[in-house]
């Protein structure tokens, strides 16, 4: 059944790529449904569109087997070729109605060819309108911006919700290897610069924290020294006051009056007169 065949072609669904060929630029879109794999090719700046499709018989002719594992491997290989930009327009002719082909993996042992037929102006306009409608639907999830922000993180809801999607064109995938190398080197330089800035900020924060810590410790040491000195000064002052009070008390004691009683200084001392006895001869 056709459904069984193309159920393994999901890697080729909703892909878009750009082909740079000579002075021309083509946009290629890939889509898969239950009965076929369809590609559309548009000539940039020319307003012309071509389409081609593979039915079940074309898949069997290319794969030669209906085994699920082989079909999945074949579809994944074509998807990798598509993403890597190994696409070419063969038998190209600018003539109206010319039959051309889209070749995937022209340098491989078994390239895949999709015959293309040019669409009429009305059909081409209808297809372009369909594409832009899908782009507009997808833009609603990012505030209607045509291109997603490089800093935007997809929400869990948008990742879980399955809606028809149309990937945005990526012109970098078919650039020359030299351009890709330059871009990689530029990105690495930006990454290294960002890491250096992060390290500098971390180091500055650590130095600032250490500086405040040392300052606080110094202030604590000064306060402790002042407290000790104040306590020592207070103790010395109290000792001096006690000595002064003791000296004042001893100096202010009144000396006993001359002739005062030693037992009771407030009273006069008693005078004792020596007794004289007369001689017996008298």
Image (spheres, helix red, strand yellow):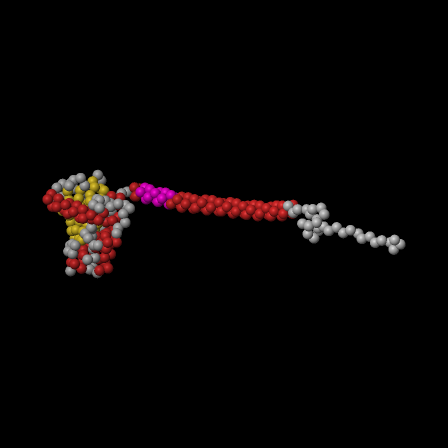
**How many numbered discs, if any?**
0
**Residue at the spot x=15%, y=42% of the render?**
48
Q: For this rendering, which residue is in front, 109 or 160?
A: 160
Image x and y of residue 137, in percent: 18, 48
Q: Residue at x 36, y 44 (%)?
A: 194
Q: Foreground: 271 or 42?
A: 271
The vertical placement of 59 against 217, above or below, is below
- Residue shown at 15%/60% (left/top)? 1
Q: Main structural element of the magenta stretch: helix, strand or loop?
A: helix
Residue 252 colored in magenta in the image: no
Residue 18 seen in the figure:
no
Q: Position of residue 143 (x, y in %)?
A: 22, 46
Residue 149 placed where, x, y %? 26, 45
Which quadrant would residue 61 be assigned to in this image? bottom left
Which of 14/9 is in front? 14
Q: Does 221 sit left or right of 49 as displayed?
A: right
* Residue positioned 45% across, 45% down in the render: 212
Question: In screen coordinates, is 135 left or right of 262?
Answer: left
Residue positioned most to the right? 281
The reply to whether residue 244 is in sight is: yes
Residue 142 in percent (x, y) is at 23, 47
Classify residue 181 by image quadrant: top left
Give the magenta range. Answer: 182-197
């Amino acid at each position: 059944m056709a459904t069984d065949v193309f159920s393994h072609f999901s890697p080729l669904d909703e892909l878009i790529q750009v082909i740079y060929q000579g002075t021309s630029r083509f946009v290629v879109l890939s889509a898969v449904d239950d009965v076929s794999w369809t590609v559309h090719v548009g000539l940039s700046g020319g307003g012309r569109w071509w389409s081609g499709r593979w039915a079940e018989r074309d898949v069997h002719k290319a794969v030669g087997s209906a085994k699920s594992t082989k079909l999945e491997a074949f579809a994944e290989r074509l998807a990798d070729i598509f993403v890597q930009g190994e696409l070419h327009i063969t038998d190209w002719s600018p003539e109206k109605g010319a039959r051309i082909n889209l070749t995937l993996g022209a340098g491989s042992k078994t390239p895949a060819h999709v015959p293309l037929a040019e669409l009429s102006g009305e059909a081409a306009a209808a297809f372009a309108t369909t594409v832009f409608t899908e782009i507009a639907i997808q833009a609603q999830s990012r505030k209607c911006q045509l291109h997603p922000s490089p800093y935007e993180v997809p929400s869990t809801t948008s990742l879980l919700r399955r809606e028809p999607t149309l990937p945005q064109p990526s012109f970098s995938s078919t650039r020359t290897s030299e351009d890709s190398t330059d871009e990689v080197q530029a990105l690495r330089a930006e990454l290294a610069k960002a890491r250096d800035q992060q390290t500098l900020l971390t180091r500055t924060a650590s130095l600032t924290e250490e500086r405040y810590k040392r300052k606080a410790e110094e202030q604590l040491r000064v306060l402790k020294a002042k407290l000790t000195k104040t306590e020592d000064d207070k103790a010395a002052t109290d000792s001096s006051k006690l000595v002064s009070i003791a000296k004042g008390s001893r100096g202010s004691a009144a000396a006993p009056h001359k002739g005062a009683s030693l037992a009771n200084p407030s009273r006069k001392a008693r005078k004792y007169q020596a007794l004289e006895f007369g001689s017996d001869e008298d």
